[in-house]
């Protein structure tokens, strides 16, 4: 083999080694990401009813539940808040969840309105912000929300009805379906607390 051929072969081997390294270190982790790694991640910045900032970092530190809804909701939201209050009572003070109720209707749900709305449910903080920031959060949590016009020029909101559970590392654990069996819900929460 000529010197030129040997040099070319070495360059090809070096390029293949760089590509293999890139595949192992860069591409493979991206392919192995799961919903648990991505859900709730984004550059949204909202405000809670206690005056704190709500970002993806808010999901870390302790087990958390996140629910998207709105204060004019006729059934799903008040029922879910009632369910959350029941779960908190069952769990007791030592195992209470930190719960965020994120509005999908920031035009009507400012922080003061949300504070009144969630005040009776233990451990629940309301979350609001600008329409643009709420839309970023809706996308980050992969929830559904859509404005639906009503006949009298008013509107309502269609939205996802699941409560999303996150472990203390901020990773998505499991969803809780609307009106899911009480024993199954408590089991999910206890498994998350134990993980």
Image: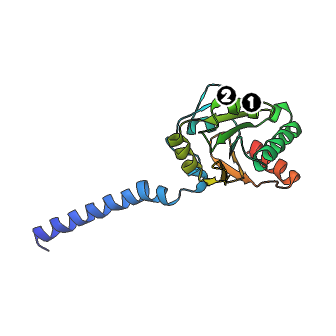
Where in the figure is residue 7, as x and y percent of width and height? 15, 65
Residue drawn where x is 27% and y is 62% of the image: 15
Considering the image in quadrants, where does the N terminus appear?
bottom left
Where in the figure is residue 192, as x and y percent of width and height? 75, 46
Front-most of 136 and 22?
136
Front-most of 78 and 168?
78
Left or right relative to 179: residue 115: left
Q: Secondary structure at mark 1?
A: helix
The dot on residue 112 is 2
**Which quadrant would residue 160 be assigned to in this image?**
bottom right
Front-most of 151 and 108?
151
Its colouring scheme is rainbow
Q: CA distance from mark 2 to mark 1?
A: 7 Å
Left or right relative to 132: residue 181: right
Residue drawn where x is 71% and y is 30% of the image: 115
Q: Is residue 60 visible?
A: no
Residue drawn where x is 79% and y is 46% of the image: 80
Q: Residue furthest top?
A: 51
Where in the figure is residue 48, as x and y percent of width and height? 63, 31
Task: Identify residue for label 1.
Answer: 116
Left or right relative to 164: residue 184: right
Q: Secondary structure at mark 2?
A: helix
**Is residue 58 shown above or below 144?**
above
Where in the figure is residue 54, as x and y percent of width and height? 59, 34
Considering the image in quadrants, where does the C terminus appear?
top right
Q: Label 2 neighbourhood size at 10 Å, few (<14), some (14-19), many (20+)?
A: few
Left or right relative to 1: residue 84: right
Marks 2 and 1 in Cβ contact (< 8 Å): yes
């Amino acid at each position: 083999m000529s010197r030129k051929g040997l040099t070319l072969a070495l360059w090809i081997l070096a390029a293949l080694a760089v590509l293999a390294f890139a595949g192992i270190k860069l591409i493979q982790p991206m392919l192995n990401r799961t919903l648990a790694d991505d859900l709730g991640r984004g550059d949204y910045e909202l405000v809670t009813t206690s005056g704190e900032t709500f970002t993806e970092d808010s999901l870390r530190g302790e087990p958390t539940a996140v629910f998207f809804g709105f204060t004019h909701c006729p059934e799903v939201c008040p029922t879910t808040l009632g369910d959350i209050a029941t779960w908190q009572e069952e769990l007791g003070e030592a195992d209470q969840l930190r719960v965020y109720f994120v509005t999908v209707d920031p035009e009507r749900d400012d922080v003061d309105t949300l504070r009144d709305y969630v005040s009776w449910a233990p451990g629940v903080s309301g979350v609001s912000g600008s329409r643009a920031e709420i839309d970023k959060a809706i996308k980050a949590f992969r929830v559904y929300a859509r404005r639906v016009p009503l006949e009298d020029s008013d509107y309502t909101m269609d939205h996802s009805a699941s409560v999303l559970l996150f472990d203390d590392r901020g990773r998505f654990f499991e969803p809780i379906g609307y009106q899911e069996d009480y024993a199954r819900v408590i089991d999910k929460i206890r498994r998350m607390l134990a993980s």
